[in-house]
Amino acid sequence: MKTHKPVATILIVSAVLHGILSFSHFSQVGILPYIMGTICLLSCIASAACFYIKKRLKNTKSWILYHNFFAVIALVTLIGHIALSR
């Protein structure tokens, strides 16, 4: 998939910008959406890192399991982040 890496890069960059720009609304939504957003961002970064360190893993097929695990964590925390931000 040639679009997977650029989309992931755009996702991470836009998430960082979103986090920076949303600090002006901190008093309105509380801290929990920020925690969920941070966990989501970190799991997206970890998912991307799994792809880039796949050659260092002993079992080269196992990187996809880690990648998918962090992707699921990112999806769950993204849903929580959106739900708590309303």
Image (cartoon, rainbow, N blue to C red):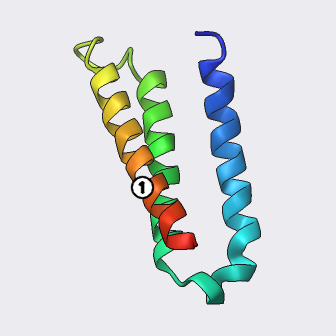
Q: Is residue 55 left or right of residue 7?
A: left
Look at the numbered disc 1 and give the secondary structure of its residue. Answer: helix
Residue at figure coordinates x 41%, y 29% from the top left: 50
User: Residue 12: where, in percent of width, then height?
Assistant: 63, 43
Q: Nearer the viewer, residue 51 or 32?
A: 32
* Residue at 66% from the left image edge and 34% from the top image edge: 9
Q: Which residue is mark 1?
A: 77
The residue under the point 70% across, 81% down is 25
Residue drawn 66% across the image and 28% down it: 7
Q: Position of residue 34 (x, y in %)?
A: 53, 71
Residue 73 in the image: above or below residue 86: above
Give the quarter of the figure containing the C terminus. bottom right
Type of amino acid at the residue the image marks with label 1: Thr
Residue 46 point in image, percent of width and height:
44, 40
Q: Is residue 41 left or right of residue 64?
A: right
Quarter of the image where one finds residue 61: top left
Determine whether, in the image, residue 14 is placed left or right of residue 68: right
